[in-house]
Every structure is written in C-alpha cells, then in structure tokens.
Image (spheres, rainbow, N blue to C red):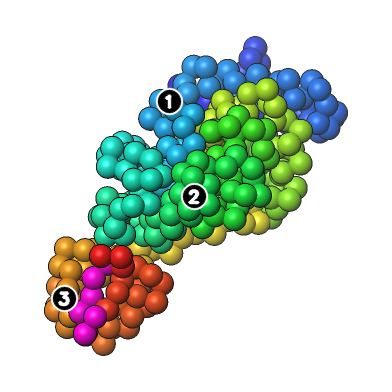
Amino acid sequence: MKHPQKPSPESPDPAERLCNLYREEGMSGQVIRLFRKIIRGHFRKAGRLQPWRETHDPYRVLVSEIMLQQTQAARVEEKYNRFIIRFPDFHSLAGATLRSVLEEWQGLGYNRRALMLHRLAQQVVKEHGGILPGDRDMLMELPGIGPYTAGAVGAFAFNIPAVFIETNIRRVFLHFFFPGETSVSDSEILPLVEKTADRKDPRSWYYALMDYGAVLKKEVTNPNRRSRHYALQSPFEGSRRQLRAGLLRKVLQNPGSTAAYLARLCSIKTASAREILHELADEGFLVMDKGRYAAGGE
C-alpha cells in the first residue's frame, strides 16, 4: 500500500488535513486523534512482520535493537534468528568467545556493536544475574546503550511509555508537523512525540510510527533532510572502516597471523595493516602475542 495517498477534492490528503489542523489548533485533542488514526490505520493494513516483534523477551529485543542500529531491517532479518539460535540468552552470549560473537556478526557491519553487546551480556550476568533491568537509568549504564536504545527496549520489552526518537520516527513528525521547515532539532520534535504517545500500548504505537516512517521514505522527498541532525554517511568503499572490517575478518579466518601476512590477504601495505591492527587491539577486538594476532578472548 502506498501512503500517503494523492489528494483529491473528494478525499483530501490526510497529511495536508492534519498539517492544516495543527496550524489552526496546535497539538489539540482533535489533532492527536487524527494523527493516531492515520498512523494506526496504516499499521493495521501494512504493518511489517519481523521476528523480533514476535517476542517480549528483553534479551531478544535488545539484540534486535543493537543489530538495527545503522543497519537496514532486511539485512538484520537475515542474521537475527541465526544469532539467537547460537546465543539464546545473556548467559550463553556472555560465556562465548569474542571470536565466535564476531564471526556470527559478520555481514551486519559496525563490529563495535558486537564487541559492546558481548561486554553488555557479561555485565548483565555479573551484576543482574542474567536478567536485563527495565529501568531506563540502569539500562544506560550498560555498554553500548544510549537514550534511544534504552527507550526502545523499555517500550518493546517492558511496554514502558518511554519517549525516544530514531530516523523513521523523526521522519514522521517532520512530515506532519514541520512541513517546509528546515534545520529542525530533535529537541523540537520530542515534546510532540511525548504528547502524541500511546501510553496504554507504547509497544505497537512505536512500531506503527516506524513503519509509517519507512513508507514515507519511499513515497516523498525524505523529510529527514530537513533535520538539523541529518548527515550523509561517508561511502564505505575505500574507507578506513572497510579496511578495519576486512582486516578483522581475515584475523577471524586466520588466527595467529602476522601483520605482513594479513596485509597480503587484504592487498594493503604492511605498515597500514599494522597500524589498524594495533588500533583494533587497543579497542579490545584483538590480542597480539609475539607479533601474531587473534580475536580478543580466544
């Protein structure tokens, strides 16, 4: 289903109606009801079916949220179930080697997330007996969890009406409530997120917002370009990120290799390889013993 629909004299565009009403009344009860009707209506007809939405288990919700950071949902769907089968809970993930976690993470990108998730699992086991706390402040004390992830886990795992924003949610609010405006800050959007939130069922409400935002990206000029926080991601091809990912992958495939050998595998200079390998070791990804590299914790 394509949404929003093209306006016609008989059936005005819902977004246009809502924008006009918002300009006249502000965030009135009528505006909130119409906004929820539009978002919920789309969700009932075209809500996405995703494996992490089928569970309220805090561990599985957390894993999905970490995976979804800066990675398209379609790619996460390819990796999520396999990761859960191999590491079904905090105890199994905490007890796994970093190498095995990184191996399973390959294809998702941004390997630092896997490193943080592994450390997070160890902290949850050590400090919370393997049970993820639902308190926002306690969540944010864990490695790799910021305001968005804490709010999302609260809503999706514990049905807590947290207030948070991510790229699809931002897109929805810019589209409906800031038409034509530029350099809009999240601090301007968050009060509207709070006012329109469904406190009885935040879980499905936020999923509905995200799904509507995903459709908007395909149907209209991306509203997120009008956000103060919008920035184009630098190309991966030929970047330092690509070199780091390639070297890490070769270490996982060839543990105990030297910098010179790994450099040949990646077709780069030994000095460049050694610099990046030392960087990865300093960050905890690798260990070096007598000039040979392996994944940390092996």
8 or 163: nearer the viewer? 163
Q: Which mark is residue 257?
A: 3
Residue 291 painted magenta: yes
Residue 160 pos. (x, y %): 64, 33
* Residue found at x 59% / y 55%: 141
Q: Which mark is residue 234?
A: none
Alpha carbon separation for disc pair 2 and 3:
33 Å
On screen, residue 293 versus residue 204, left or right, reads: left
Which region shows up in magenta?
Answer: 289-295
Q: Amino acid at mark 3?
A: Ser
Q: Which residue is mark 2?
A: 124
Alpha carbon separation for disc pair 2 and 1:
23 Å
Q: Amino acid at mark 2?
A: Val
On screen, residue 198 versus residue 46, left or right, reads: right
5 or 164: nearer the viewer? 164
Of tags 2 and 1, the one toward the viewer is 2
Residue 193 pos. (x, y %): 70, 37
Magenta stretch, main secondary structure, is strand
* Residue found at x 27% / y 83%: 274
Give the class, few, some or many, for how many residues have Cα within 10 Å of label 2's Cα (few <14, many ≥20).
Answer: many
31 or 150: nearer the viewer? 150
Q: Secondary structure at mark 2?
A: helix
Alpha carbon separation for disc pair 3 and 1:
42 Å
Q: Which mark is residue 54?
A: 1
Q: Secondary structure at mark 3?
A: strand
Q: Earlier in the sequence, mark 2 or mark 1?
A: 1
Q: Residue furthest right?
A: 25
Give the class, few, some or many, for how many residues have Cα within 10 Å of label 3's Cα (few <14, many ≥20).
Answer: some
Q: Earlier in the sequence, mark 2 or mark 3?
A: 2
Q: Is residue 234 above or below residue 71?
A: below
* Residue found at x 45% / y 39%: 59
53 or 159: nearer the viewer? 159
